[in-house]
Image (tube, grey):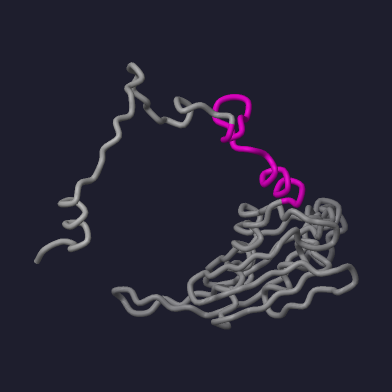
Amino acid sequence: MAKSSRPDRKKNDRRSDKRREPSEYEDVTLAIDRVTRVVKGGRRMRFRAVVVLGNRKGKVGLGTGKATEVQASIQKAQRDAKRHMIIVPMNGSTIPHEVNIKHKAAKLRLMPASKGTGIIAGGPLRVILDLAGVKDALAKRFGTGNKLVNAQAAMIALGMLRGSQAVIAASAAPASIGGAATPVAQKSAADLGIFIPEGPNLPIKEVKMNDQDRKQMNEGPKG
């Protein structure tokens, strides 16, 4: 008897029963490039994917992946981005302070903006700021137009950001080593590392200059 139908097939099918839960992160594929490597037997061709992953709540990551197929390279890049997530400090809807960064051939400048400005940026930098949750920022790119290098520079710039409260506290707090902070004016010579030898107070002897010494001083050094 020919097998015309199998009613129990859908019941035992794992793919039909599996329900994918919505992910917390959103991903954007920045670029898919075909790269080659010269080996002994010839050239080895693969695809390289650059993916940005973020939750729009202050966490963002950048990853790259290589594979012989496009879909496999994207999946590798997503896993790599999830392993390299960073937390971006925020000051409301913008970044806390200005950042200038130079990475390889890319130069970037990030500046905070007032509320309602939006993201004034282009290329990979706009995608990274958007997925990080930054709503107002000004940015300018100088140098190369390579997407991967610019994306790496943007991640380094975001990693250099410090929270506004932390920056104010660090600048206002006096320096302290192993205890309570002491102003420099109140520190003793021993605290500053200055050695003063102890001894009796010697009287100061006044030395008078004669006419010959004055003449030598006025003539200056010889030769």
Please tell me in which quadrant of the rendered image residue 121 appears. bottom right
Residue that appears at 63% across and 26% down: 180
Q: Residue furthest top?
A: 200
Asked if residue 127 is among those painted magenta in the image, a careful observer would answer no
Relative to the observer, which residue lies in front, 71 or 26?
26
Pick the front one: 141 or 205: 205
Q: Nearer the viewer, residue 116 or 217?
A: 217
Q: Which quadrant: the N terminus?
A: bottom right
The image shows residue 40 at horizontal and vertical percentages of 29, 74
**Left or right, 88 with reference to 220:** right
Count of numbered labels shown in the rendering = 0
Answer whether residue 190 is visible to the viewer in this image. Answer: yes
Give the image location of residue 94, x and y in percent.
Answer: 80, 63
Q: What residue is at 72 percent from the left and 46 percent from the top?
A: 166
- Residue 202, position as x, y percentages in the image: 32, 22
Please state the extent of the stretch shown in magenta in the rendering: 163-185
The quarter in which the C terminus is drawn is bottom left
User: Is residue 116 left or right of 60 when viewed as pictured?
Assistant: right
The answer to whether residue 194 is above or below residue 21 is above
Q: Measuring 31% from the left and 76% from the top, which residue is drawn there?
A: 41
Residue 9 appears in the rendering: no
Is residue 94 or residue 13 the one in the foreground?
A: 94
Return the x and y of residue 53 as percentages of the image width and height: 71, 62
